[in-house]
């Protein structure tokens, strides 16, 4: 891994490695590309792309892109959800570690206690979202439902304005408030290993972006994804493409409820409060079906080659 300063220094060709991986189509510095050209054997040049479930990714994965200005070829490499892509980021033991943790109720209690969680509830939710998420409507729907007591854990710094408005105090670690059936507690922001255990502990996880979205799938629990908003609503097809794959194994009525809830969370379609409340109510009523669906989905993804192994195989093949 190389630091990328504002003014990239001239480097010797022999210092260029056998493979160069650039992320998300960022343009390598000209001096670095020149060193790649001058190397006695051209390096394998990889453009590592964003994760998407869209079908076109299958066709673009490993596609060669000869560079017009230099005698080098760049190869697109996509993570994805099918065997025609590079697969997903996954540690070799993550699924087994998750299984062991979820089977050990004592470990779960100790972990939650370390976060300051003392409340008893029927359902435990985690909330990791962007600042603009429609949190007020979600919290109102949870507070009004009478079927189960819900405890929602929010890491400090996540959507602070909206969470503070519900708490009626600053959203700092330890802040807690109960309204109706809902209790919201602010917990410490945590490292990746602890965040995995939080996802493994909860009955439902709200996640965002790309990384926590994937970690929620390895957690094998129901989840709601807030995609990173893009210009001209370019993120909406990404949500729909993933839902088409993810919901394929669910009964149609459950699949429809999940899709509506995700649309509400990503502010797609109707903005009426009543429609949002109905969507959340229907979604919460289907959590049992999603709880069964999660392990099957995670195990199916776990059968694919992981992204790192796919990348190493391809580089070795191209050298």
Image (cartoon, rainbow, N blue to C red):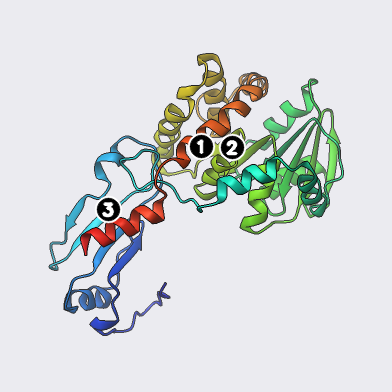
Residue 98 position by quadrant:
top right
Foreground mark, 1 or 3? 1
Mark 2 or mark 3, which is nearer the start of the sequence? 3
Are circles 1 and 2 on residues that touch, CB within 8 Å? yes
Taking depth in this image into account, of 170 and 228 the one nearest to the observer is 228
Taking depth in this image into account, of 218 and 128 the one nearest to the observer is 218
Mark 1 lies on residue: 299
Q: Regarding mark 1 in the picture, which secondary structure is present there? A: helix
**Residue at 82% in and 44% down:** 168
**Residue at 64% in and 18% down:** 282
Spatial separation of the CA atoms under disc 3 and disc 2? 29 Å
Look at the image and tell me in which quarter the C terminus lies.
bottom left
Mark 2 lies on residue: 220
How crowded pointer 1 is (Cα within 10 Å; few <14, some 14-19, many 20+) is rated as some
Foreground mark, 3 or 2? 2
How many numbered marks, from 0 up? 3
Spatial separation of the CA atoms under disc 1 and disc 2? 8 Å
Mark 3 lies on residue: 76
Q: Regarding mark 3 in the picture, which secondary structure is present there? A: strand
Mark 3 or mark 1, which is nearer the start of the sequence? 3
Mark 2 or mark 1, which is nearer the start of the sequence? 2
Are circles 3 and 2 on residues that touch, CB within 8 Å? no
Taking depth in this image into account, of 15 and 308 the one nearest to the observer is 308
Look at the image and tell me in which quarter the N terminus lies.
bottom left
- Percent across and percent down for residue 2 are 40, 75
Note whether residue 16 is visible. yes
């Amino acid at each position: 891994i190389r630091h990328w300063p504002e003014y990239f220094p001239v480097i010797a060709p022999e210092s260029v490695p056998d493979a160069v991986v650039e992320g998300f189509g960022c343009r390598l510095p000209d001096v670095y590309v020149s060193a790649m050209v001058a190397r006695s054997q051209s390096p394998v040049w990889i453009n590592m792309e964003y994760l998407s479930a869209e079908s076109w990714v299958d066709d673009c994965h490993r596609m060669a892109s000869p560079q017009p200005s230099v005698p080098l070829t760049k190869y697109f490499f996509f993570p994805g959800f099918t065997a025609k892509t590079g697969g997903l980021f996954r540690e070799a033991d993550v699924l087994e570690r998750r299984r062991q943790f979820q089977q050990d109720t004592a470990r779960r209690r100790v972990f939650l206690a370390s976060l300051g969680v003392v409340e008893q509830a029927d359902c435990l939710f985690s909330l990791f979202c962007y600042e603009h998420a429609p949190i007020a409507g979600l919290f109102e729907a949870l507070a009004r439902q009478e079927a189960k007591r819900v405890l929602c854990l929010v890491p400090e710094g996540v959507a602070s304005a909206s969470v503070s408005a519900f708490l009626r105090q600053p959203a700092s670690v330890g802040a807690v408030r109960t309204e109706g059936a809902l209790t919201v507690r602010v917990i410490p922001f945590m490292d990746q290993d602890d965040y995995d255990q939080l996802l493994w502990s909860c009955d439902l996880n709200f996640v965002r972006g790309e990384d926590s979205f994937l970690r929620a799938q390895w957690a094998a629990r129901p989840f709601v994804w807030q995609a990173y908003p893009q210009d001209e609503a370019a993120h909406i097809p990404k949500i729909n493409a993933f839902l088409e794959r993810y919901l394929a194994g669910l009964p149609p009525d459950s699949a429809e409820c999940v899709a509506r809830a995700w649309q509400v969370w990503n502010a797609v379609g109707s903005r009426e409060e009543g429609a949002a409340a109905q969507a959340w109510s229907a979604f919460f009523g289907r959590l049992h079906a999603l709880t069964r669906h999660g392990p099957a989905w995670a195990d199916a993804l776990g059968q694919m080659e992981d992204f790192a192994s796919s990348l190493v195989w391809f580089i070795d093949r191209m050298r």
